[in-house]
Amino acid sequence: PGSKLISSGINAEYGEFFESCSCFQIINSLLFALAVFIVLILAMHCKAALIASLIVAAELATIERIEHIQTKTWYLGMNLNPADGHIMDYTTGWSEDNFIGTYKEALQKDYINRVVWNMPVNYIALVRHQNGEVDAVKVFRFKIGGLSMLSRFQDMDPGRQIVTEGGPLQESVSSNAQNMGDDPVFSVDGDLAFNWAYSNNGARIVLTGGYLSPADANDDNTHGLGNHYSCNPLTGESIDPRWIHEISNIQDCPLSSCNTVMVQGKDHGPGSKLISGPVYGNYAIYVSADAATFPLPGHFLSTEIVVESRIYTANEL
C-alpha cells in the first residue's frame, strides 16, 4: 500500500508537470505568432511610410524652367529697285566684287554690300517690301552651306544650279499684298535656282516652280531677278545691252510667238518687246549663317536684323 501511494503521488506530480509543459508550449506559440504579427505590421507600416516619404519628396521637389534667348542676325546683301534708273541685269553686280549704292539708300535703290556678299552663309531670305515695310518673304536653306553669295553667282559655267532644297522654310505674305498673281518670287513654288543659263540668255534668280528653259533653248521665256536676253551667261558678259532687264514677271511668252515681255518698272534696255509695267515693290536679299526665320509682314527693315529664338530647359532643384 505504501508503494502504491508513492507511485500515485509520482504520477500525479508528473501529470501536472506535463500539463504545465503543454500550456507553456501553447503560450510560447501564441507569443511567437503575436511577434510575427507585430513584425508584419511594422514592416507594412515602414513600407507605407517609405512610399509616403517618396511622395512627399516628389511633391516638395521643384522644377525650374530656364529660358535661354539666342540671337541670330540677317544681313542685307542686295536690294533691287526696278525703277531707280540703275539696271541690275544678269551682267551687272551679281558676280562682281564691288559695292553698289549707299548705306543711306540701301533699301530705296539698287544696292550690293560687298562685305556681306563675301560672307559665308547658310540661309537666304527674299523679301518684297514697300518703302522698307515687309510685304512678303520667303526663307530658304542652301544645299551647300558656308559659301558666299559672290562665289555662288560667280559659278556660272555651266550654271543652272538649284541651290536650295525642300522649298521655303518660311513663306509669309501680307493680307494687303498686291500683284501676287505673276510675282517672280511669290507666285511660283519650288526652290531657288541661280545662274539659269540658256542659249544666249540668263536669269540670276528663278524658282523651280516656274518655267525653266532648256540649256539650248533660245526662247527668252525664263523669268526672274537679274535678266538678259543677249549675253554670254557662262561668263556674265553682255552682247547686246538692248535686252537687259532687272525684274521680269512670271508669264508664258516664248520668242517664237510672243513679242511683249512684261517687266517691272523702267529699269530695262530699249528692246522693243520689253514692256514697262507696275513696280510690285523693292526686292531685298538677306543672308545669314544661322537664322532660319524672318520677321513677318509689317516689319520695317534695316541693313541688319536681329531675330530671337527661345529655348527652354528644365533644372530640378
Image (cartoon, rainbow, N blue to C red):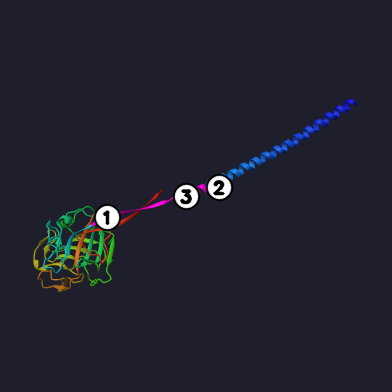
Asked whether, in this view, residue 113 is left or right of residue 41, the answer is left
Residue 86 located within the stretch drawn in magenta: no
Residue 55 located within the stretch drawn in magenta: yes
Tag 3, which secondary structure? helix
Vertical comparison of 54 with 154: above or below? above
Q: Which of the 4 image quarters holds residue 69?
A: bottom left
- Measured from the top left, where is residue 213 in percent x and y? 19, 65
- Tell me the residue that label 3 is attached to: 58
Vertical comparison of 135 with 49: above or below? below
Q: CA distance from mark 3 to mark 1?
A: 36 Å
Residue type at mark 2 is Ala
- Tell me the residue that label 1 is attached to: 71
Tag 1, which secondary structure? strand
Vertical comparison of 139 with 52: above or below? below
Q: Residue at x 88, y 28 (%)?
A: 5
Asked whether, in this view, residue 121 is left or right of residue 56, the answer is left
Bin the neighbour count of mark 3 within 10 Å (Cα to Cα): few under 14, some 14-19, many 20 and up: few
Bin the neighbour count of mark 2 within 10 Å (Cα to Cα): few under 14, some 14-19, many 20 and up: few
Q: Residue at x 32, y 56 (%)?
A: 310
Vertical comparison of 98 with 228: above or below? above
Residue type at mark 1 is Thr
Indicate the quadrant containing the N terminus: top left, top right, bottom left or bottom right: top right
Disc number lying in front (3 or 1): 3
Q: Which is nearer the eye, 45 or 282?
A: 45
Q: CA distance from mark 2 to mark 3?
A: 15 Å
Give the residue furthest to the right: 1
- Tell me the residue that label 2 is attached to: 48
The part of the chain drawn in magenta is 52-73
Q: Which of the 4 image quarters holds residue 255?
A: bottom left
